[in-house]
Image: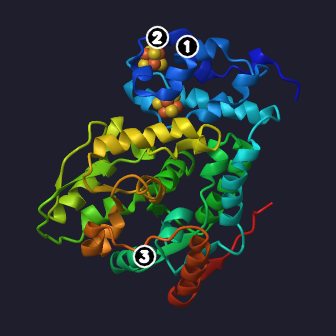
Amino acid sequence: MKYNPSKTLSDALRQVQTECVECGLCQIECRFLQEYGSPKQIADGFDLLKEAHRTMAYACSLCHLCTAVCPKGLNPAAMFLEMRRAAVKYGLGPYPQHKRILDYELRGVSRRYTWYGLPAGCETVFFPGCTFTGTRPETTLAFYRYLKQYIPSAGIILDCCAKPSHDLGRQQRFQALFNEMKGFLIENGVKKVIVACPNCHQIFKQYAGEIAVATAYEFMANDGIPTRREHPEAVTVHDPCALRFEAPVQLAVRQLLKKQGLTVQEMRHHGRNTLCCGEGGSAGCLAPELSEQWGILRKKEGNGRRTFTYCAGCVSNMRRRMPTGHLLDLMFEPEKALKGRNRVLGAPLTYLARLWVKKRLKREVHATVIRERNLSR
Ligand code: SF4
Ligand code: SF4
């Protein structure tokens, strides 16, 4: 398609152009904006014909902190996502540096790694997500078994929500992948999806329409494991940026920590104003130094305290720098989690783990509807 800058201008971009007052609040929080200018400056000067603008939006973490702090109610993050979509539309993005994450998605939707098991009367399914299943195969099964105690007809789906395509601006590919899954779920009577991953939550909430989405953390806080134990140290919480606007989830997480007898000392940036761990938007593929900055800030605010979060991707990224654990590890193996001794797998073992979970589920789930899907092309 021939590039036409004025046609590339989207609603989000035009809104920033006309309504941003350049108050600087978002720039104070974000190194990416400090480097490239205020959202208005970026919107006014945006031109895909400029070399620097072709990749610029891929350096934004899509973390929405700018959106959270904007007094004018603007959404610069949405503008950067639209800039990525424009780059894809004109055959520029995604870039070779994104191959690894796109290959990850490709495997996630392949026949080898997908598995749907829906028992008779299944209306609720657990959707653990690729990263959670791969890094924590035993905890994946533990949560599903726990869920079945309350909802015996609960099913399980091993599949990818296609967030990598979504965030890299491949909207057509994303919609093809997600809508096929959504259609299958609706056709088979699924009304609710329970997720472990904040990114899956974001995708289901935005695109799943009539299918409701909830987190494993809300489910446990309501039906919960009322274990009380004493732990002398205070812990802190890293709220994943994909759930920054989900106050009920953040509350459920703190309730679960309290039920474990833990005291939470909040970091300066938490809840709605949380920081990205550095993984967001695959920004590290093209701008590793900017994405590193988020991790460095998080470490500083963590101040050496044991940190619990509820995103497997955040844990993997943050534990390089600071003592970080996953909330579901804490729920099912509290003693180990408090000492940071849970078994967390890394690639390539994560792929074997996903196959192991699939094999176990095939034996364990009395499913009347089963499928593997193959959308790897
Ligand atoms: S989404 Fe995050 S990284 Fe991107 S501009 Fe906003 S605050 Fe900065
Ligand atoms: S916070 Fe909002 S109004 Fe202020 S500079 Fe950022 S986008 Fe513009």
10 Å neighbourhood of mark 2: few (<14), some, or many (≥20)? some
The picture quadrant for ligand 2 comes to top left
The correct choice, above or below, for 75 with respect to 338 in the image is above
The correct choice, above or below, for 251 with respect to 95 in the image is below
10 Å neighbourhood of mark 3: few (<14), some, or many (≥20)? many
Going from N to C along the chain, the mark reached first, 3 or 2, is 2
The correct choice, above or below, for 334 with respect to 310 in the image is below
Indicate the quadrant where residue 229 lies.
bottom left
Q: Which amino acid, mark 1?
A: Lys
Q: Which amino acid, mark 3?
A: Tyr
Respond yes or no on whether mark 2 lies under 8 Å from ligand 2. Answer: yes
Residue 317: x and y, percent? 47, 53
- The residue to which callout 3 is attached is 144
Asked which secondary structure carries label 3, the reply is helix
Residue 180: x and y, percent? 69, 59
Label 1 – label 3 distance at C-alpha: 47 Å
Asked which secondary structure carries label 1, the reply is helix
- The residue to which callout 2 is attached is 22
Q: Looking at the picture, tell me which residue is in the foreground, 285 or 25.
A: 285
Residue 42 is left or right of residue 19, and the answer is right
Respond yes or no on whether mark 1 lies under 8 Å from ligand 2. Answer: yes
- The residue to which callout 1 is attached is 40
Q: Looking at the picture, tell me which residue is in the foreground, 349 or 57.
A: 349
Q: Quadrant of the N terminus?
A: top right
Going from N to C along the chain, the mark reached first, 2 or 1, is 2
Residue 21: x and y, percent? 46, 9
Q: Looking at the picture, tell me which residue is in the foreground, 216 or 271.
A: 271
**Nearer mark to the viewer, of 3 and 2:** 2
Residue sitting at x 63%, y 11%: 44
Label 2 – label 1 distance at C-alpha: 7 Å
Q: Are marks 3 and 2 in contact (CB under 8 Å)?
A: no
